[in-house]
Amino acid sequence: MELIRFAQRNYNLLLRALSEHIQMVLIALALSILLAGLLTLAAMYFRRLGIVLTYVFSIVYSIPSIALFALMIPMPGMGLGRTTAITVLVLYNQFLLLRNFITGLGGVDHAIVEAAAGMGMTRTQIIFKVRLPLSLKPIFVGIRLALVSTIAIAIIAAFIGAGGIGLLITIGLETNNNNRVLWGVILSVGLGIITNAALVLVERRLK
């Protein structure tokens, strides 16, 4: 089969594209979780801030990805390449992460929070010792959704020179190489399905 022969001849190319994609996704996810964690912590102290942040990032999330990539390119320090791609991915992830983080931490039974406060816990202690352990499931759901979304959106980042699996597809389309396009699709879909399935198993254990 031609598809298999292409993989045998170009396995280094496929592995490099997959490796670049995974690296870009993991960096973006780590930065996304860090930023969302800090914003969520601020939202726990200032309730209205959480509403404003969720609204703002919902607008960002509604912008087509290729348009947001194009908007970010002229910004200082951006341009073509992975830096812009990761920045856009982090911005997209904030809506998914903040929505679940704030909902999870804010959804803890009020009676439990009051009991913790009655024991003399500070607001920060309540957040980390009471709210956080009791809201791991919605927090993890947010991380899972963000990761799968990042895998998909990162494919489009190839159009701005960020590399990854998307590069297989774009070059394949430009050169009319169907095998390259198909392997790009196979790798992206496979990575998304395997990652989601693995995280669903972990999520079930959190119950």
Image (cartoon, grey):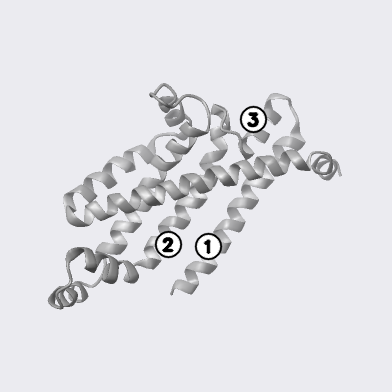
The alpha-carbon separation of the residues under discs 3 and 1 comes to 29 Å
- Residue 76 point in image, percent of width and height: 38, 24
Q: Who comes first in sequence, dot 3 or dot 1?
A: 3
- Residue 80 point in image, percent of width and height: 51, 25
Q: Residue furthest top?
A: 74
Q: Amino acid at mark 1?
A: Leu
- Which numbered dot is residue 140? 2
Q: Residue at x 79, y 39 (%)?
A: 10
Q: Which residue corresponds to mark 1?
A: 199
Q: Which residue corresponds to mark 3?
A: 170
**Marks 2,3: beta carbons within 8 A:** no
Q: Secondary structure at mark 1?
A: helix
Of labels 2 and 3, the one closer to you = 2
Q: Secondary structure at mark 3?
A: helix
The alpha-carbon separation of the residues under discs 1 and 2 comes to 9 Å
Q: Who comes first in sequence, dot 1 or dot 2?
A: 2
**Marks 1,2: beta carbons within 8 A:** yes
Is residue 17 found left or right of 63 in the rendered image?
right
Q: Amino acid at mark 2?
A: Phe
Q: Using the image, determine if residue 148 lies above or below residue 82.
A: below
168 and 38: which is toward the camera: 38
Q: Which quadrant of the rendered structure holds the C terminus?
A: bottom left
Q: Residue at x 51, y 40 (%)?
A: 153
